[in-house]
Image (tube, rainbow, N blue to C red):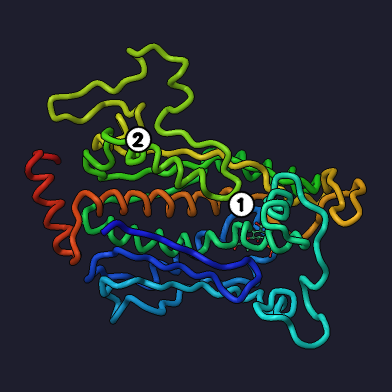
């Protein structure tokens, strides 16, 4: 059974929800490890004051007993503490009483770069909030919780996944500059996966190529506009003799320009995925837009937001890569019980003599 992930939740609604299906039974989960990743995602220079309100913690509603998965759907919840300030504005049912708190007035000023305009046009919303709440990167919190579960599964076959910011010191300087100019900035993050055996993914069918799957998983994260694997775009400027990773007798490589993927298949080297994040679209110095109610020129919506969320993206991209690698590993090794999964992995690495 393939691993599947479905999520729901609005940024200021009651909670974020994830349902993970296809996980083998008997996988040991550590609540502290999941919460530690949730905390890492909330930290980082340039985040909004919202992070002082939220203290993200995972709750498990189904699929786990005494810390072990049951092989049934795993239901995870991360509550939005800030919802208490939005109970009227984000009430799932028609709200009772006088409007109170936040989100009571319709938003009609779409922000360039956000889901606002395409969202209201596509779904026929009158209030931009109906689009922006789900498009918000807030819901990456449950993806991080799912990624922590994926990392637990990968840990059983000795795979480790870690995300980091590229050039973190320079980023902090740019964040200070952006904040003082009431502007926003993006940046670049990198995810490395160690211990991935050769043979995850395949060249046999385009949709199953692991490079494409990883790229889609990372590109699907809010504000990501570019993804590269290994040396990526730089490879286009090199000669073949400078671009490929020569094979040693032990079948490892001294270089890793390919970022651990050849022909859509893992080759046993470290998997390296980088993502470029655009500057966040909510500016305190707003850009030109249109008032959707009057049709007149206007300035885009200004509301509390982050100056940058690049450090958070490193954690979210790590989770996305971990989820996709766990899926690919489970497709290859299978197993309804985690021992079957690990046993198949062990038999495979023995067959190919991989160290
Ligand atoms: C976000 C706007 C900010 C961020 C939010 C994403 O939220 P608010 O509008 O409540 O200040 O803080 O991210 C999170 C809350 C989070 O946990 O990452 C947006 O518009 O995408």
> Residue 247's quadrant in the figure?
top left
Q: Earlier in the sequence, mark 2 or mark 1?
A: 2
Q: How many C-alpha atoms fall within 10 Å of the one at disc 1: few (<14), some, or many (≥20)?
A: many
Residue corresponding to mark 1: 309
The answer to whether mark 2 is within 8 Å of ligand 1 is no
Is residue 48 placed above or below 269 in the rendered structure?
Answer: below
> Residue 145's quadrant in the figure?
bottom left
Q: Residue at 80% across / 48% down in the picture?
A: 182
The answer to whether mark 1 is within 8 Å of ligand 1 is yes
**Mark 1 and mark 2 in contact (Cβ < 8 Å)?**
no
Is residue 201 placed above or below 55 in the rendered structure?
Answer: above
Q: Horizontal and vertical percent for residue 69?
A: 28, 72
Dividing the image into four quarters, tell me where ligand 1 lies: bottom right
Residue corresponding to mark 2: 206
- Judge from the rendering whether residue 62 lies leftward or rightward of residue 117; answer left or right: left
> Distance of mark 2 from mark 1, alpha carbons?
32 Å
| Residue closest to the eye, 302 or 42 | 302
| Residue closest to the eye, 308 or 334 | 334
Q: Horizontal and vertical percent for residue 29?
A: 31, 70
Q: Closer to the observer: label 2 or label 1?
A: 2
Q: Residue at 45% across / 63% down in the picture?
A: 6
> Residue 264's quadrant in the figure?
top left
Q: Residue at 48% across / 73% down in the picture?
A: 77
Quarter holding the N terminus?
A: bottom left
């Amino acid at each position: 059974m393939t691993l599947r992930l479905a999520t729901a939740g609005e940024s200021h609604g009651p909670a974020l929800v994830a349902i993970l299906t296809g996980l083998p039974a008997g996988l040991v989960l550590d609540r502290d490890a999941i919460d530690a990743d949730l905390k890492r995602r909330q930290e980082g220079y340039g985040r909004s004051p919202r992070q002082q309100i939220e203290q993200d913690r995972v709750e498990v509603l189904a699929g786990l007993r005494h810390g072990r998965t049951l092989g049934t759907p795993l239901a995870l919840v991360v509550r939005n503490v800030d919802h208490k300030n939005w109970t009227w504005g984000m009430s799932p049912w028609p709200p009772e009483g006088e409007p109170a708190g936040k989100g009571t007035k319709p938003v009609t000023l779409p922000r360039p770069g956000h889901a606002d305009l395409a969202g209201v046009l596509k779904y026929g919303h009158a209030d931009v909030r109906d689009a922006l709440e789900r498009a918000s990167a807030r819901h990456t919190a449950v993806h991080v919780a799912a990624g922590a579960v994926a990392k637990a599964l990968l840990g059983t076959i000795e795979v480790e996944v870690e995300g980091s910011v590229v050039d973190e010191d320079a980023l902090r300087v740019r964040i200070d500059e952006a904040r003082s100019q009431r502007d926003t900035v993006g940046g670049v993050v990198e995810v490395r996966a160690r211990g991935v055996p050769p043979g995850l993914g395949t060249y046999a069918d385009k949709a199953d190529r692991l490079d494409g799957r990883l790229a889609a998983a990372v590109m699907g994260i809010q504000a990501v506009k570019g993804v590269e694997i290994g040396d990526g775009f730089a490879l286009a400027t090199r000669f073949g003799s400078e671009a490929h990773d020569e094979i040693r007798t032990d079948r490892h490589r001294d270089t890793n320009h390919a970022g651990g993927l050849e022909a859509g298949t893992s080759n046993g080297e470290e998997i390296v995925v980088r993502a470029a994040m655009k500057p966040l679209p909510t500016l305190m110095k707003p850009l030109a837009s249109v008032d959707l109610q009057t049709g007149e020129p206007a300035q885009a919506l200004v509301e509390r937001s982050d100056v940058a969320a690049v450090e958070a993206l490193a954690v979210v991209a790590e989770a996305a890569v971990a989820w996709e690698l766990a899926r690919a590993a489970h497709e290859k090794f299978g197993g309804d019980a985690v021992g079957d999964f690990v046993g198949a992995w062990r038999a495979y690495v023995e067959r190919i003599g991989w160290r």
